[in-house]
């Protein structure tokens, strides 16, 4: 018979990681709303997080990287195009395909969102302390299977 307390503990990590991510995203959106970027919503973040700010990607790549269906990406792309954040252009390697990229306005918005994220991270650093943030980044990198745990920890002390 499985230990229900252990089973609950196993689910806690994923739940807490998700809740922490959503809390940061909600706060970022609230701050961006004060800067004429209030049209952005949680559903847009998966696409914007996956989109390479310096390049262009196919919608199918965005869907894969964002972990959503092609249909879901298509719907969000329509909204983001209407807001002037992204545009779809012909793929020079395949005329039948389209590439998604940030518009000039979208790149400026991306830079501002990253600045807000840095502000939020700095606030967490002040709240939790450099040592705890460094350890958290190292541990999260290890959980994600990224070899950059030491780099992430070093960056935490510079924020």
Image (cartoon, grey):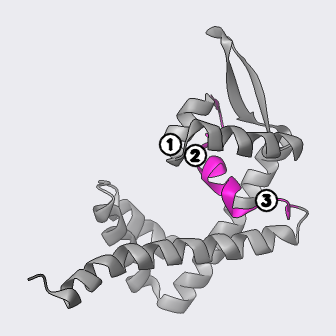
Judging by the rendered image, the residue that carries numbered circle 3 is: 40
Judging by the rendered image, the residue that carries numbered circle 1 is: 65
At x 30%, y 64%, the residue is: 143
Disc 2 crowd rating (10 Å Cα; few below 14, some 14-19, many 20+) is some
In contact (CB < 8 Å): disc 2 and disc 1: yes
Please say if 94 is above or below 158: above
The stretch in magenta equals 37-56
Place residue 84 in its image quadrant.
Answer: top right
At x 80%, y 67%, the residue is: 32
Query: Number of marks in the image?
Result: 3
In the rendered structure, the answer to whether residue 145 lies left or right of residue 28 reads: left
- Between marks 3 and 2, how big is the CA–CA gap? 15 Å
At x 75%, y 62%, the residue is: 41
Frontmost residue, 23 versus 2: 2
At x 70%, y 31%, the residue is: 100
In contact (CB < 8 Å): disc 3 and disc 2: no
Judging by the rendered image, the residue that carries numbered circle 2 is: 50
Q: Where is residue 46 in the image (x, y as percent from the top left)?
A: 60, 53
């Amino acid at each position: 018979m499985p230990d229900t307390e252990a089973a609950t503990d196993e689910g806690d990590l994923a739940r807490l990681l998700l809740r922490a991510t959503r809390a940061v995203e909600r706060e970022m959106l609230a701050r961006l709303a004060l800067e004429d970027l209030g049209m952005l919503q949680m559903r847009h973040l998966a696409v914007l997080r996956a989109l390479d700010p310096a390049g262009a990607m196919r919608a199918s790549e965005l869907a894969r990287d964002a972990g959503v269906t092609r249909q879901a990406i298509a719907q969000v792309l329509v909204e983001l195009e209407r807001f002037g954040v992204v545009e779809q252009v012909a793929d020079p390697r395949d005329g039948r395909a389209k590439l998604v990229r940030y518009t000039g306005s979208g790149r400026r918005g991306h830079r501002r969102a990253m600045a807000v994220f840095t502000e939020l991270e700095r606030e967490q650093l002040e709240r939790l302390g450099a040592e705890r943030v460094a350890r958290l980044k190292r541990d999260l990198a290890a959980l994600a299977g990224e070899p950059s745990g030491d780099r992430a920890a070093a960056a935490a002390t510079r924020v």
